[in-house]
Amino acid sequence: MDVVLIILVIAIVAVGIFFRDFKSVVYFIGIIDIFFRLLHKLVSLIHVKAIDNFVSNYIPSSVEAIIDNYSSGILNTILIWILFLLYVYFLFYLIKYWLKKKK
């Protein structure tokens, strides 16, 4: 699971450097979290033991699960609140984009 954290941090930094926009980083975190959750839901629906074991052992269930795994105490609380605010920011931009497309 340590590799997942390293890859995620490198990917977030790479997205930030490549796009040079905070909004892109927020979108990336939202996309990754949705991907993790959908993957775990899909595996739970198809009931293939080998795939289920692989996903359960090597792929986190969400970004919050990664934070919970690698931090504790006040740092965990602060990171979870930051993640929550990023989700609010993500939702704000999704709604803004959706309303703009309706016009």
Image (cartoon, grey):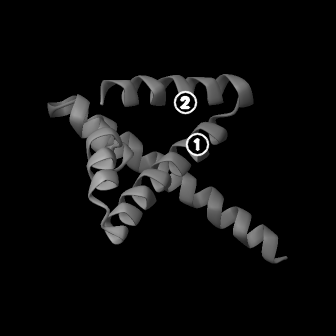
**Residue nearer the viewer, 76 or 40:** 40
User: Percent position (x, y) of residue 76?
Assistant: 23, 35
Toward the bottom, the furthest residue is 102
**Location of mark 2 (residue):** 12
Cβ–Cβ under 8 Å for marks 1 and 2:
yes
**Location of mark 1 (residue):** 28
Q: Quadrant of the rendered structure where residue 74 is?
A: top left
- Which residue lies at the image location 32% right of the left edge and 36% below the top edge? 79
Toward the right, the furthest residue is 103
Going by the numbered disc 1, the residue's amino acid type is Phe
Q: Quadrant of the rendered structure where residue 63 is?
A: top left
Using the rendered image of the protein, determine whether residue 40 is visible from the camera's viewpoint.
yes
> Image height check: is 2 above or below 40?
above
| Count of labels in the image | 2
> First in sequence: mark 1 or mark 2?
2
Q: Residues within 10 Å of mark 1 (few under 14, many from 20)?
A: some
> Image height check: is 17 above or below 55?
above
Using the rendered image of the protein, determine whether residue 77 is visible from the camera's viewpoint.
no
Quadrant position of the N terminus in the picture: top left
User: Percent position (x, y) of residue 77?
Assistant: 23, 39
